[in-house]
Amino acid sequence: MQDTEGKNVIITQTGTQFSSVGQVVINPNSGTISASTLAFEATLLREARKSGDPAYVQEATFGRDANVQDAINKKVADVEAQTGTVIGKSEVDLYAFEDDNYTWAVRAHETNLGDFVCDAYLYYATNAGVMADIAFVNGGGVLANLNRGNVTKGDLINVNPFNNQLCYTSVSGQDLLDALELSASSLPESNGDFLQVSEGLEFVIRTDIDSPVLRSGSTFVGIDDAKERRVRRAKLHGKAIDPQAAYTLVCHSYYLVEGGGSYSMLCKNPVTLLGLDNDALMEYVQLNLRGVIGQQYANATGQGRIATQVGPDPDPDTDPDPTPKPEPEQPEPQPPANDASDPKPFAPTGDDGALKAGAAAVAAAAAVGAAAFATAHAETEDERA
């Protein structure tokens, strides 16, 4: 290719993981540069000085060096001794992939593994004395299923393999809502920047309308106010997110410091560092879940934190309140009886039969009382006589 001065330059690219080996020869004697790519297996290049040709490179095939292989074996055994440590168990399977074990689930919708990871981040901060409100993880940062059975350190490292630095910062409610809108912008297409969220946060995404997110290249510009937002009814612990309020957010530094994934709205304020993301998963299992990932994470599609909706919200019920039923007629109040021996009248119940039975009972009680009084009076008169 030509550079800015119009000179021909060589650009080389040989792939990854030693799939091929490239050779570039710079010859200062002739002032030339040449390049070639040699594709072969189990072969290394070794420079062999040859009389009369100092630039000669000989291709040679080698076996594994015994000393190097021994060092590798010892290092592998040391790593496996640490990562193989069992730190708990899971009663359920947690999913990063769909059932085909190939298509990313965690990048397209809520999953139980996404719930688990975000909850771990949130409680990791809480355990450190930080009263955080929300935690996020991008679907592209969750890389492996977590199967039921024993859970090892290696299993959790496989879930979060990048050793991302967790941190927390203060964000406004408006910035949170804009971040959720950005997260939803690619649906139903899979996207590594799709956000999984922690417990307490719930919202609905309308997938049938265009995203209002404005970008300039990969930079977030804002929200087109002329369009409807896809994200609606966003609530934290049952209360609508207040655009003017401040919330404490836990995530990794790629978002909160670097503004990666176009999430520049999340890195406006200083951050405080926590630990590594996979350390948070381990601590959550051991300390907060007491060694058992239980049935709270049984549903493969999560706990209903992120719902999708096609079509507008239903119209609110505008019918007037129904006319209240009339109260039953109450009996006319009776003046209190002069006789102190009269029992207290029954409280009205609104039931005619009950009122009549109550009146009869009162009359009967009065008659019995009068008869008893007459008998006692007669006996007293006899005694006097």
Image (tube, rainbow, N blue to C red):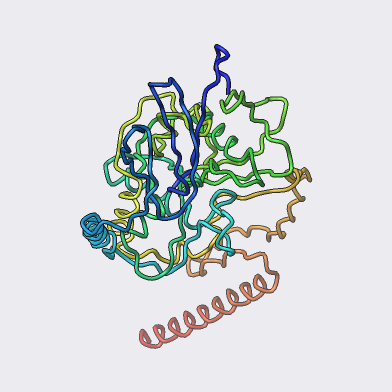
In the image, residue 173 above or below residue 320: above
Q: Quadrant of residue 41?
A: bottom left
Q: Position of residue 323 (x, y in %)?
A: 77, 50
Q: Viewed as shown, does residue 117 lie left or right of 130?
A: right
Residue placed furthest toward the right: 319
Q: Residue furthest front?
A: 52
Q: Residue shown at 43%/20% (left/top)?
A: 31
The quadrant of the picture occupied by the C terminus is bottom left
Quarter containing the N terminus: top right
Write the residue at 49% across / 48% down: 39
Image position, residue 53 (x, y; %): 36, 33
Q: Is residue 68 above or below residue 166?
A: below
Q: Residue at x 59, y 49 (%)?
A: 108
Percent position (x, y) of residue 56? 38, 37
Q: Is residue 174 above or below residue 36?
A: above
Q: Nearer the viewer, residue 203 or 81?
A: 81
Q: Residue at x 46, y 57 (%)?
A: 144
Judge by depth and name the residue closer to the eye, 67 or 154. 67
Q: Quadrant of residue 311?
A: top right
- The spot of residue 130 in percent (x, y) is 31, 39
Residue in front for this viewpoint, 257 or 369: 257
Asked whether, in this view, residue 26 is left or right of residue 210, the answer is: left
Please indicate whether residue 313 sits to the left or right of residue 65 in the image. Answer: right
Q: Nearer the viewer, residue 241 or 264?
A: 264
Please count the marks in the image: 0
